[in-house]
Image (cartoon, helix red, strand yellow):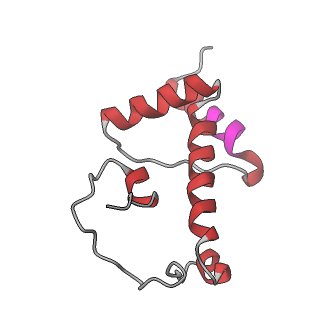
Amino acid sequence: MAMTNAQKQRAYRQRHLSGGTGEIIKTVVSVSTKRQLERLARHHGVTRRAMLERLLAAAEREVVSGIADTAAYYAGTGAARQGAPARVPPERPVRRHSWLARILPRRAR
């Protein structure tokens, strides 16, 4: 007897989430963001999951390299960048779909 879609999904989740090494993230992103992820993944010859993991790891390395108290960062209590106030308002609005624009420094004017 053929499996129903629900049974197939349950089996997929059990295979990929067993061992506690994975979690499901459910979120909606813009079409352009999804296409960017697909293009980057295809260019690097990896899956979208692997590309997302690489991008997040690189962004976190950049953040961690600029803070003094990494223990506070990893504990989730937050830590401001070294020598900077806890929150600096942007000079101009940042496009919401561009997370990279928020983590990369602005060019000097």
Residue 26 picture location, percent across and down: 44, 47
Q: Residue at x 24, y 68 (%)?
A: 91
**Vertically, is 50 above or below 42?**
below
Q: Which residues make up the magenta segment? A: 11-17
Question: Is residue 14 located in the magenta-colored stretch of the structure?
Answer: yes
**Left-right relation of 97 to 14:** left
Residue located farthest toward the right when viewing the structure as drawn: 19
Q: Quadrant of the C terminus?
A: bottom left
Residue 23 picture location, percent across and down: 61, 51
**Left-right relation of 60 to 99:** right
Question: Is residue 58 located in the magenta-colored stretch of the structure?
Answer: no
Q: Residue at x 56, y 78 (%)?
A: 76
Residue 77 occupies quadrant = bottom right
Residue 94 picture location, percent across and down: 27, 57
Residue located farthest toward the front when viewing the structure as drawn: 109
Q: Residue at x 32, y 47 (%)?
A: 97
**Vertically, is 1 above or below 28?**
above
